[in-house]
Image (cartoon, rainbow, N blue to C red):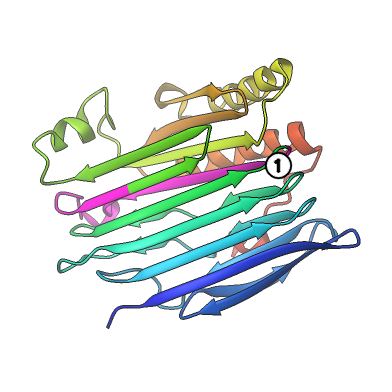
Amino acid sequence: MAWQGRLQLDYRLDGQRTVGRDRHHGPLRVLKSLHPEGPGTCHHVLVHPPGGLAGGDRLELVATLGQGTHALITTPGATRFYRSLGEQALQSVDARLEPGARLEWLPLETIAYRGTHAANRMRFSLAGGAQMIGWDMLALGLPASGQAFDLGRYEQRIELPGSWLDRAIVDAADPWFGRLLDGPLGWDGQRAMATVWCACGEAWPDALREALLDDARQALAAGPLAARSGATSPAPGLVLLRALAPRVEPLWEAVQAVRRVWRERLWKLPPAAPRIWRT
């Protein structure tokens, strides 16, 4: 039997406090609502008790961030797309930020198992003055266990309407599959990829945009991924970077480093890493 889960998150200001209310149907819910940085920022840890998605499973997250709110959303473990017997597993995220809202979308990695048939779709709509920092880390197969991603199909879509649309398909049945994963213009033999972005619902001043780019490049240059990473700004209110690694662990260090410098640059806030990351 396929799992069908839906979670609605609604963030509103109660005085100076960001209050997050949730409604869920099925096995996707909020583990904990925390305010470790003070009342202005609400940390939400999302859990999916079945532990992963198999063929036919559907998980849907819809979030609305009211004016002036600040939400940090993360997970306690990896999102796992297991082997499918034919049906597609789907995870979708649709977040809408009202003016002045802030979102940090910081889930742990996504693992696409050998033989999966899966899609992961994310859409973040930012009104004028709204800002976000987000990341996605994708691992293909389980290299440490000798399980290569040589069978299956994984689709990913990340969209910031009006600024950026990123769509990727990794399909082992594609005749160009080997060149995609091992060619120097593709994954270059690596099996884990991170995409990190910060965005605003309106154009940043040129000086801020350049500073965010410099921050990202310096953070990457200081780590082991300098040769397989890069940062760019394809739109006036968007800075993004990509990095490749053989496994997730080096990516994890890199994305945290970039988030730290961006958080300080944009909001004058310390890192405030969620405690769940240390358990």
Question: Residue 250's x, y, as percent?
Answer: 46, 40
- Indicate whether 113 appears above or below 215: below
Question: Residue 92's x, y, as percent?
Answer: 43, 59
Q: Residue furthest right?
A: 15
Q: What kind of residue is marked 1?
A: Ala
Q: Which type of secondary structure does the marked residue at label 1 adopt? A: loop
Find disc 1 in the rendering and name its residue. Answer: 130
Whether residue 130 is in magenta: the answer is yes
Q: Is residue 103 left or right of residue 82?
A: right
Does any portion of residue 107 appear in the rendered image?
no
Question: Residue 141's x, y, as percent?
Answer: 26, 53
Q: Which residues are magenta?
A: 129-155
Does any portion of residue 233 appear in the rendered image?
yes
- Which quadrant, please, contains the C terminus? bottom right
Residue at point 67% right, 65% down?
10
All told, the count of numbered labels is: 1
Q: Is residue 235 left or right of residue 178?
A: right
Question: Residue 268's x, y, as percent?
Answer: 81, 37
Q: Nearer the viewer, residue 159 or 148?
A: 159
Q: Nearer the viewer, residue 59 or 275?
A: 59
Q: Nearer the viewer, residue 188 or 96?
A: 96
Whether residue 153 is in magenta: the answer is yes
- Indicate whether 133 appears above or below 154: above
Residue at point 43% right, 32% down?
243
- Which quadrant, please, contains the N terminus? bottom left
Residue at point 47% right, 46% down?
136
